Image: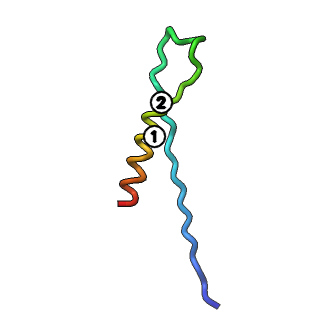
């Protein structure tokens, strides 16, 4: 009987928040910086595969 090993990896990237100004309180409720999150995730995936 042969034994096998399964490697399990989990990647965690926190969501970056955009600059939320005092005057936006009560007007805008979207806190995430989509551009920054997308660019960092692309940079992580390209460096991981290279």
Residue shown at the point (56%, 64%) measured from the top left: 8
- Judging by the rendered image, the residue that carries numbered circle 1 is 38
| 16 with respect to 2 (left or right) | left
Q: Which mark is residue 25?
A: none
Is the residue marked by circle 1 packed among few (<14), some (14-19), or many (20+) residues within 10 Å?
A: few
Residue shown at the point (49%, 33%) measured from the top left: 34
Is the residue marked by circle 2 packed among few (<14), some (14-19), or many (20+) residues within 10 Å?
A: few
- Marks 1 and 2 sit apart, C-alpha to C-alpha, by 9 Å
- Judging by the rendered image, the residue that carries numbered circle 2 is 33
In this figure, which colouring scheme has been used for the structure?
rainbow
Measured as percent of width and height from the top left, residue 25 is found at 56, 12
The quarter of the picture where the C terminus appears is bottom left
| 39 with respect to 2 (left or right) | left
Measured as percent of width and height from the top left, residue 5 is found at 57, 76
Going from the N terminus, do you reach mark 1 or mark 2 first?
Answer: 2
Residue shown at the point (45%, 40%) measured from the top left: 38
- Nearest the eye: 6 or 29: 29
- Nearest the eye: 13 or 45: 45
- Classify mark 1: helix, strand or loop: helix
The quarter of the picture where the N terminus appears is bottom right
- Above or below 15: residue 48: below
The quarter of the displayed image where residue 26 is located: top right
Measured as percent of width and height from the top left, residue 39 is found at 41, 40
Residue lying furthest top: 23
Q: Are marks 1 and 2 in contact (CB under 8 Å)?
A: no
Residue shown at the point (48%, 30%) measured from the top left: 33
- Above or below 4: residue 26: above
- Classify mark 2: helix, strand or loop: loop
Residue lying furthest right: 1
- Above or below 23: residue 2: below
Residue lying furthest bottom: 1
| 47 with respect to 23 (left or right) | left
């Amino acid at each position: 009987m042969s034994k096998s090993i399964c490697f399990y990896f989990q990647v965690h990237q926190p969501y970056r928040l955009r600059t939320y100004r005092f005057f936006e309180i009560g007007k805008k409720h979207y806190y995430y910086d989509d551009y920054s999150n997308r660019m960092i995730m692309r940079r992580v995936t390209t460096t991981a595969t290279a």
